[in-house]
């Protein structure tokens, strides 16, 4: 066990663990918690007593400081088994302090938030233990953002053919047939924004998400939460057209992000500012656009108003803004108009004709020079030299310069020299990006924005962030996977604990003569060790302290929890519950109706037994098929193949069953 600024880290001797500074700060800032324990290794049930004993120095520190709360960041640290209480319960009862711990995997999200997703072993989430009280569920995220309950109450199936899943930043909306992704996927690297949730739309390698499905999710949120929700492109596709469709459908403004807001840093031990990052359709990080968020408004008389700029950053720190929104000065003659696809360089004071809004392309940053009918001459060269010199290397390699203004042959030669000198590409005449998704009619972004390089909301357009709690800190990069291979007998996707660390630079395959630019390093979420061998424990969520068997403690909580409370243990032996179908309950039949009579005492004799027709079997629904397929992900085909082999050998299984229904039902049996 090692200690870093009041955070105690437990790990195996050969498994060192590094915690990002933003996570350390988040764990330390609660005034009642003077200690936190991060367990970065698998702890079996037979090792829990040893773990508690090893933490005695932490107990002494808590007693001396008078602290009353311990953060236990340990995968399944709040999950009781049928024979052993959880680590959180043991610490709570033996030390007499409050404990916060997860019942599922523990993920340290960039920015300092803790996240515990649902998994194969059951429901995740962070739980609050207090001596002598029933544990209270706090939510999937800790510290709890103001929008937590509104997002958690949404069902998995939100629209035909689509499912929604909890992610740290809010929700992930994806086609039902899309393969499941692990917790170290990029979507888990998007930090929590306390000002409002995000809806990540789509996943890499899947079909596009329909605008109707997005509208269904937003319509299910309360009004105040809906107004602060932002759509994020989870599959790399431009969301501007989708945002406009949803705005027209709901009749409200819809916030649309150009890319994914992540925390970039080369060193996982250092904090980094939040930046919007474009991701291609394969999930590979690309360049950082200058326009982060715009708002789409409903069309009036069939004409959509231009999207309003909400958050942006200047290409060069310290650039001076103009009276027009999203416009910065390059010099006394030329200015840059920032767009979602890049920028447009034009002469100051000249209202050039509007260009068609270019769709966002993750592989191309468009620099458009001038406009048709407007002169483009040598007075622009000094401004372009300054602009191109200060462009970041990873962005410069994706720049495509396209000339729209009127120019001479000599001007074109000068532009070529400038482009080559700065290792930029100059588009040939008539070139257009191959990216066409999300294109809209002419519509420049408009709004008010503050100058300067850091991304910041335009005055009066972005709500003031609501503080989480004294322990909330949201200001750091993306996570990476530290999850070792799952023990035998457990699903491979079973997560345990996650910590952010730099993701490797990825780039798509390209000809050797022209290598792709290196992707920016981002911090991604990571899981900690899987469950011990023997299968996941069944959650009991029993109470702590002397009231464990008191039935009065089974009522729902009224002290600020989410309504889901733990159940105390009772002297009765634990019985594995049978799966019950999600159907309407039938009225309880009486003995006269069924013709079946049971003795008052179990003497082993059955009386007056008569036959009754077997109940009609419940049929699974298409929505349940879609949910099962999304849950199994890449394993779906393997289970279906096994079912097909079984149907070949036992054709009687098909009797009275439609092929899709029986295939999905038997695939579920084979999987579980």
Image (spheres, rainbow, N blue to C red):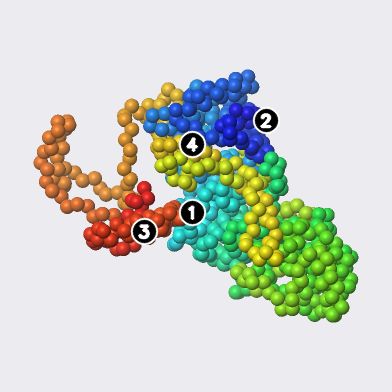
Measure how far apart labels 4 and 1 are at the Cα level: 21 Å
Q: Residue at x 26, y 58 (%)?
A: 649
Mark 4 closeness class: few <14, some 14–19, many ≥20 residues within 10 Å: many
Q: Which residue is mark 3?
A: 641
Q: Which residue is mark 4?
A: 76
Q: Residue at x 83, y 66 (%)?
A: 421
Which of the two discs, 2 and 3, sits closer to the camera?
Answer: 3
Measure how far apart labels 2 and 1 are at the Cα level: 37 Å
User: Which of marks 4 and 3 precedes in the sequence?
Assistant: 4
Measure how far apart labels 2 and 4 are at the Cα level: 24 Å
Residue 180 - label: 1
Viewer-proximal residue among 188 and 205? 205
Q: Which residue is mark 2?
A: 5
Q: Tag 1, which secondary structure?
A: loop
Q: Where residue 631 appears, x then y in whole percent?
A: 44, 52
Q: Tag 2, which secondary structure?
A: loop
Q: Tag 3, which secondary structure?
A: helix
């Amino acid at each position: 066990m090692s200690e870093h600024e009041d955070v105690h880290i437990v790990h195996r001797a050969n498994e060192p663990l590094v915690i990002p500074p933003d996570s350390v700060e988040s764990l330390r800032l609660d005034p009642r918690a003077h200690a936190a324990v991060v367990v970065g290794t698998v702890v079996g049930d037979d090792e829990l007593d040893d773990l508690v004993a090893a933490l005695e120095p932490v107990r002494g520190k808590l007693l001396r400081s008078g602290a009353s709360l311990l953060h236990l960041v340990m995968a399944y640290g709040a999950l009781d088994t049928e024979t052993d209480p959880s680590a959180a319960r043991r610490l709570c009862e033996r030390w007499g302090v409050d404990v916060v711990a997860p019942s599922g995997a523990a993920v340290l999200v960039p920015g300092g938030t803790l996240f515990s997703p649902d998994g194969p072993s059951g429901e995740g989430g962070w739980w609050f233990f207090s001596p002598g009280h029933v544990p209270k569920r706090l939510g999937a995220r800790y510290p709890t953002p103001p929008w937590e309950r509104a997002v958690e109450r949404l069902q998995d199936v939100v629209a035909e053919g689509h499912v929604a899943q909890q992610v740290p930043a809010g929700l992930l909306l994806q086609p039902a047939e899309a393969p499941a992704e692990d917790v170290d996927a990029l979507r888990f690297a998007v930090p929590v924004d306390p000002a409002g949730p995000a809806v990540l739309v789509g996943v890499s390698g899947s079909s596009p998400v329909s605008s109707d499905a997005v509208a269904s999710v937003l319509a299910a949120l309360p009004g105040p939460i809906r107004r602060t929700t932002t759509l994020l492109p989870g599959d790399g596709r431009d969301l501007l057209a989708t945002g406009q469709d949803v705005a027209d459908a709901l009749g409200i403004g819809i916030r649309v992000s150009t890319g994914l807001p992540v925390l970039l840093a080369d060193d996982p031990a250092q904090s980094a500012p939040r930046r919007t990052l474009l991701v291609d359709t394969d999930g590979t990080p690309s360049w950082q656009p200058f326009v982060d968020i715009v708002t789409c408004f409903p069309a009036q008389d069939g004409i959509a108003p231009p999207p309003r700029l909400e958050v942006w950053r200047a290409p060069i720190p310290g650039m001076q803004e103009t009276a027009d929104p999203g416009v910065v000065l390059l010099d006394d003659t030329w200015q840059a108009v920032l767009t979602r696809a890049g920028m447009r360089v034009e002469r100051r004071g000249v209202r050039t004709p509007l260009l068609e809004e270019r769709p966002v392309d993750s592989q191309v940053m468009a620099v458009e020079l001038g406009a048709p009918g407007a002169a483009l001459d040598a007075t622009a060269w000094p401004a372009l030299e300054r602009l191109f010199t200060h462009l970041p290397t990873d962005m410069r390699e994706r720049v495509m310069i396209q000339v729209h203004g009127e120019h001479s042959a000599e001007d074109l030669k000068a532009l070529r020299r400038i482009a080559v000198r700065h290792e930029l590409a100059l588009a040939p005449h008539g070139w257009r990006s191959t990216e066409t998704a999300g294109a809209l009619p002419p519509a420049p972004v408009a709004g008010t924005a503050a100058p300067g390089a850091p991304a910041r909301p335009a005055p009066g357009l972005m709500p003031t962030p609501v503080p989480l709690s004294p322990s909330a800190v949201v200001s750091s990069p993306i996570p990476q996977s530290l999850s070792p291979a799952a023990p035998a007998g457990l699903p491979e996707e079973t997560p345990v604990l996650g910590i952010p660390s730099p993701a490797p630079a990825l780039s798509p395959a390209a000809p050797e003569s022209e290598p792709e630019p290196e992707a920016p390093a981002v911090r991604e979420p990571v899981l900690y060790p899987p469950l011990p061998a023997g299968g996941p424990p069944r959650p009991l969520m029993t109470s702590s302290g002397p009231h464990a068997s008191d039935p009065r403690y089974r009522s729902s909580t009224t002290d600020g929890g989410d309504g889901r409370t733990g159940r105390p243990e009772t002297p009765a032996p634990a019985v594995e519950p049978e799966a019950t179908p999600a159907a309407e309950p039938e009225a309880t039949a009486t003995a006269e109706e069924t013709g079946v009579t049971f003795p008052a005492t179990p003497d082993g004799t059955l009386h007056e037994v008569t036959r009754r027709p077997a109940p009609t079997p419940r049929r699974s629904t298409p929505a349940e098929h879609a949910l099962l397929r999304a849950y199994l992900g890449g394993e779906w085909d393997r289970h279906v193949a096994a079912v097909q082999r079984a149907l070949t050998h036992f054709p009687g299984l098909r009797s009275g069953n439609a092929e899709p229904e029986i295939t999905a039902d038997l695939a579920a049996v084979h999987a579980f």
